[in-house]
Structures are given as structure tokens and as C-alpha cells.
Image: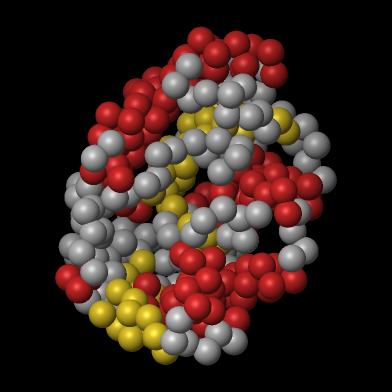
């Protein structure tokens, strides 16, 4: 496989890419620290790519604090848009293909339909807007790109909904979980595998692609599955989003159509509940490297 450089290596997806690379025996891959690969340092990024000479760059660096982004607009914009532009330019200058990770939050989510890549994007919060602007920056500056939108990412690494539910479920007798926001959980290990499959395919069908696990669920049913699979004895109560107001609005329905990525690259995508069971088993068995927990 061609040489790969991962930006944002310390985050959840970056750690999953490292785990999957080790499992698959991918050795020609570099995971620089945030200091070595500062997404806001255009000159530094260019120097890094000059030195490493990767064929592919995977961008996992992002501002993902959805509610905080409403207050930290400039920082969110800098990381998600300006940083993406800097990286795209560095890739162009060094003949590298960019795999840029984006989000279902680029959609308004007010219609019950499977979202296709060419559907109109209309974000309803700052995070989604800055991620969409990041996509546009990549498209404007670099032809050789794959933009992969994903949703509800979780894993055994970093902070995420699954680990939060396991923690709260162990501490409390009862929890209220939002039931009127619908989407698809995505196991970041599965996304990491898909990214490596795309690289290995040698298919230059550049553009935007949707990737999540298969299936549809609400946050409430996702939480119930977490408790069921883990054997956590806690009562989960469905509540409307209006009962748990947040600073940033969320899409009510953001289930993505994955036909394009499956047909283009021949991917087999796991069902969300099957992948959730694998993740919870990994968390409970502590078989992953504690360094990346």
C-alpha cells in the first residue's frame, strides 16, 4: 500500500486508524503528533508533506464540540475550514491525495429520506456550517480528494456516546434519552477499515461519499442497545429533544444513503448493532492499548 500520513492522529478516528493499520499489517503509515502536524500551520504542513512524501493524507483533525462551536465560531471555522484549505494546498503542492472526513451535520435533517451525496446541504449549527465550508475548501483547492461524511462516531477510544452511556448507566438508576433525533451510529474501527479499503482499491473516483454503519436508530434506541448488550441495569426513558435543550440545534433525521461508496469501492458495511457489540466487548475486555484509551 502507498505511504499514508494521518493528520489528527491523537483523536478518536486517528487512534482507530492506528489500531486497524497494526491489525492489517500496514507499516508505511505516519502518525505525527499535533505539534508536528498543526492543521493551522500552513508552512508546517507543507514541510511535513515534503519530508514524508505520502501518497495519501487522511485528515481526522476537526473541531467537533458541537455546542461549544456556537460560542467559539472563529476557532471552529479556523480548524474546520481554514485548516482544511491549508492541508488541501499542501497536498496539491506535494502530489498527495487527501481523504477528508466530514459529517452528516452538513444537512438540515428536516425530511425523512435517505440523504444522498448530491442532496442540498443546509447546516443548522456552526459546527455543520464550518464542516461544509471545509468540504468546499478541499474541493476548491485540490482535485484529488475523497470527502467522507460520517455520523454518530464512537469507539473504545476517546470520549463518545457509548462510553458516556456505559458510565452513566453504571452510576444511575434512570436516564432520559432523546428519542426524536434519528440517524446511524458508526463504529470508528469500521470507518478506519473503509478508508484503508478505499486507498487499497486504487480507484480514482474522487468526490464526496457517505459512510456510516447500516441501519437506522434514535439516540434512545441506541442507548437501550448499549445497556442491553453490556448488561447494564438502568431504566431508559424516551424524551423529546425539547426536554433537553442544547445551544446547537441537531438534525432530526440524518440517515445517509451509502449506495455510492458501496458500489464504487465494493464495500460491505456492517450493521450498527453488530459493530456496537464488538466495541462493547473491546471496552469490557480491555484488549486495546491503554495508551489510546
Which one is nearer the viewer's eye here, 283 or 200? 283
> 167 above or below 44?
below
- Coloring scheme used: secondary structure
Instruction: State whether residue 85 appears in this view.
Output: yes
Task: Identify the image quadrant of residue 241.
Answer: bottom left
Q: Is residue 5 visible?
A: no
Total residue callouts: 0
- Residue shown at 38%/81% (left/top)? 175
Residue drawn at (77%, 32%), measured in percent from left and top? 28
Task: Specify whether 276 is left or right of 140.
Answer: right
What residue sits 55% from the left and 13% below the top?
A: 44
Please indicate whether residue 55 sits to the left or right of residue 285 in the image: left
Camera-nearest residue between 250 and 150: 250
Above or below for 148 versus 52: below
Picture quarter with the C terminus? bottom right
- Residue 190 in percent (x, y) is at 60, 58
Q: Residue furthest front?
A: 171
Q: Position of residue 247 (x, y in %)?
A: 21, 53
Q: Residue 115, how many percent across, how many down?
A: 31, 58
Residue drawn 37% across the image and 60% down it: 256
What is the x, y in percent for residue 169?
A: 49, 79
- Figure quadrant of the N terminus: top right
Q: In the picture provided, is 113 more to the left or to the right than 26?
A: left
Amino acid at each position: 500500500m502507498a505511504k499514508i500520513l494521518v493528520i489528527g492522529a491523537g483523536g478518536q478516528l486517528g487512534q482507530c486508524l492506528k489500531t486497524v493499520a497494526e491489525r492489517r499489517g500496514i507499516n508505511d503509515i505516519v502518525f505525527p503528533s499535533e505539534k508536528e502536524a498543526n492543521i493551522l500551520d500552513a508552512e508546517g504542513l507543507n514541510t511535513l508533506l515534503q519530508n514524508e512524501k505520502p501518497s495519501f493524507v487522511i485528515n481526522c483533525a476537526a473541531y467537533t464540540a458541537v455546542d461549544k462551536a456556537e460560542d467559539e465560531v472563529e476557532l471552529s471555522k479556523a480548524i474546520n475550514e481554514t485548516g482544511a484549505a491549508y492541508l488541501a494546498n499542501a497536498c496539491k503542492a506535494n502530489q498527495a491525495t487527501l481523504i477528508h472526513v466530514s459529517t452528516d451535520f452538513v444537512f438540515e435533517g428536516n425530511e425523512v429520506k435517505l440523504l444522498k451525496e448530491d442532496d442540498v446541504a443546509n447546516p443548522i449549527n456552526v459546527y455543520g456550517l464550518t464542516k461544509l465550508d471545509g468540504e468546499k475548501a478541499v474541493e476548491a483547492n485540490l482535485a484529488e480528494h475523497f470527502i467522507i461524511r460520517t455520523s454518530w462516531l464512537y469507539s473504545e477510544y476517546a470520549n463518545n456516546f457509548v462510553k458516556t452511556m456505559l458510565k452513566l448507566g453504571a452510576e444511575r438508576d434512570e436516564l432520559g434519552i432523546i428519542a426524536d433525533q434519528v440517524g446511524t451510529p458508526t463504529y470508528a474501527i469500521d470507518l478506519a477499515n473503509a478508508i484503508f479499503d478505499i486507498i487499497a482499491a486504487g480507484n480514482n473516483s474522487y468526490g464526496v461519499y457517505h459512510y456510516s454503519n447500516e441501519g437506522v436508530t434514535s439516540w434512545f434506541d441506541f442507548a437501550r442497545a448499549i445497556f442491553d448488550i453490556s448488561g447494564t441495569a438502568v431504566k431508559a426513558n424516551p424524551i423529546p429533544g425539547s426536554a433537553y435543550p442544547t445551544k446547537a440545534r441537531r438534525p432530526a433525521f440524518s440517515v445517509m444513503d451509502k449506495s455510492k461508496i458501496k458500489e464504487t469501492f465494493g464495500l460491505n458495511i456492517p450493521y450498527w448493532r453488530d459493530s456496537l457489540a464488538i466495541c462493547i466487548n473491546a471496552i469490557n475486555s480491555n484488549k486495546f492499548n491503554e495508551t489510546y484509551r
